[in-house]
Structures are given as structure tokens and as C-alpha cells.
Image (cartoon, rainbow, N blue to C red):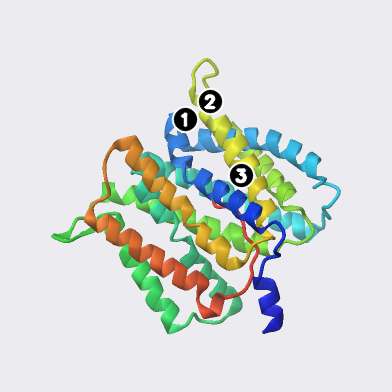
Amino acid sequence: MSRQLVRESPAKTGVSRATVLLTIAMAGWGTIGLFAQGAKTDPITIAAWRCVFAVGSLILMSLLVGAFRASRFTARAVTLTLVGGIALVANWILLFAAFDATTITIATVSYHMEPFFLVAIGSIIARRAPSRLSICWLLIGFTGLIFTTRFLRFDGLAIDSTSLIGPLAGLGAGLLYAVATLLAQRTEGIHPQVMTLMQCALGALVLLPFAGMLDWNGTSWWWIAAMGIIHTGILYWFLYAAARKVSTITLAALSFVNPAVAVLTDILLTGKLPTAEQLLGIALIIAATLAVTLGPANQRDRPHNPKT
């Protein structure tokens, strides 16, 4: 009990600064849908060049903080990092495909079903079924997703194959993120920034042969460069600077800044307010995710990894 309290209570020094950094990171990731739409190119090209720009910024960040010297490259750690990198980069491709196929709100909310995938996959790995309460919250969260995507409306069902593409891509991205997160939690020795650098380098090597060239005379490449430098380089740095100084509860609670900013961004971009069904769905997902993430069975610190 006392040991858990020690882990859950952040150090008094630097908590305020850490909370600010974490909030900035989560808010920044909430705008990534806007940047993906501004890129005006296909998901593979966005993901590939995001990796390229991220590699440059992460090399600089790693040198500044001495991340290379702090890393131990064992065969197991390198293998888990590279496999996790495949999942992480594939997650980006599906997320960008979701932004391309549907609204930022629906894509982001679908993606944020990933805590439920973490519970399910974690239970399989641990060979321990989730509690009945957790299953109930999973069903509530899934109901929220159906309302948010407007497959279920107050006047009945509205499902067609076209409307399924965006949410399914978002769900797939969330599933791959869960896989990448679970692998990262089991990776020891490699500094988080170096791990992300290795994953982005792998993503660039794999995706560039299939990616289109950027229009260097236009403005679309600026959006992708910003995703690589800001969303992947600087905001990762903010996250890593804050994650070890705040509690798991704070990490989980502030993670909802991400979808909140995404919804606001969507409203500002399109001028369309969420419908009553979508507001209900978002509320159900937030309630279910908080319950699953912060419930009694999950009141312990776990490694935290970036979503986007």
C-alpha cells in the first residue's frame, strides 16, 4: 500500500511545470488532424515524410539530452523496438486514412477506443479475464462510439459501407497503438527518444519507396514537416520530461485534452457543431475510458507512450 502511494504521488518539485508540459503535448496532438488535412496527400506519403522530418529532430533532441549515452542496446530491446515501430508507423497510416475518410471528430474518437484494446490484449497476455465491471464499461464505450459515428441515432440505425471506412480505420489505428504501447512497456534499456528515433528511421526506410514526392514549391510539405518536428520531436520531448514527474491519474486525465482539442479543431475547421448523438457518444466514451483506465484494478503506474 505504502509503496503504491509512493509511486502514485508525484514529486512536489517540478509538478506544475510537468503538468504544463503534458497539457501542451496533449493539446498539440489534438491538432494533428488539421495538419494531416493541410498536407493534402495520401496517408503513406504523410507517414513516410513525417518519419523523415522526425528523424532529424529526434537526433538533435537525443544529442542534447544525452539519450544515446543513456541507452543499452540488447538484442531483445532492439527487436521489441523495431516490431513496435512497425505497429506505430502502421498506426499513423490508418489514422491519416481515417482523417481522409471522415471528420476529425469521428476519426479521433474512434482512435481513442485504444484503452479498451489495451485492457483486452493485456488480459490475454496476463491470461486473466477482465472483470465483469470492466466488460460493462467496454460495452458502454462501444455504445458511445456508435453514437459518435452516428451509426446509431435517436431516430434509428444509419449504417452503410461508406460511413464505416473512417471509424474502422480509426479503430485499427487504436489497436496498433495498443500493440506498440504493450511492446514499449516491455522494452528496457533504450532511452525513449532513441526508441522513437529508431522506429521513425525504420518507418522512413520501409515507407519511402511507396511514398510520393513532396511538392517543395507548395505549402503542403510544411504541414508534414511540422508533424515530424513538432508532433513527433518537440511534443515527445515534453511528454518524456513530464511523464516521470506526474501520477498515472494525471497522465490519464490530461490525455482527454487530446480529443477535446480535436473536436474543437473540427468545429473551427468545418463550422459544424457536434450533434446531440455525438455529444452523448463522446460523454459515454470519456466516462468509460476514465473508468477502465483509473478503476481499482488499474491504479498503478505503467509506462506511458505517445499516441500520435
Labels 2 & 1 near each other (Cβ < 8 A): yes
Quarter of the view holding residue 190: bottom right
Measured from the top left, where is residue 157 in percent x and y? 18, 60
Front residue of 228/126: it is 228
Measured from the top left, where is residue 255 in percent x and y? 51, 57
Labels 2 & 3 near each other (Cβ < 8 A): no
Dot 2 falls on a residue whose secondary structure is: helix
User: In front: mark 3 or mark 1?
Assistant: 3
Left or right? Give the position of 192 relative to 28.
right
Instruction: Give the amino acid at mark 1.
Output: Ala
Which residue carries the number 1 mark? Answer: 39
Instruction: Give the amino acid at mark 3.
Output: Leu
Dot 1 falls on a residue whose secondary structure is: helix
Which residue carries the number 2 mark? Answer: 221
Which residue carries the number 3 mark? Answer: 235
Of callouts 2 and 1, the N-terminal one: 1
**How crowded is the residue under tag 2: few (<14 C-alpha within 10 Å), some, or many (20+)?**
many
Classify 123 as above or below 77: below
Left or right? Give the position of 39 relative to 18.
left
Measured from the top left, where is residue 265 in percent x and y? 39, 41
**How crowded is the residue under tag 3: few (<14 C-alpha within 10 Å), some, or many (20+)?**
many
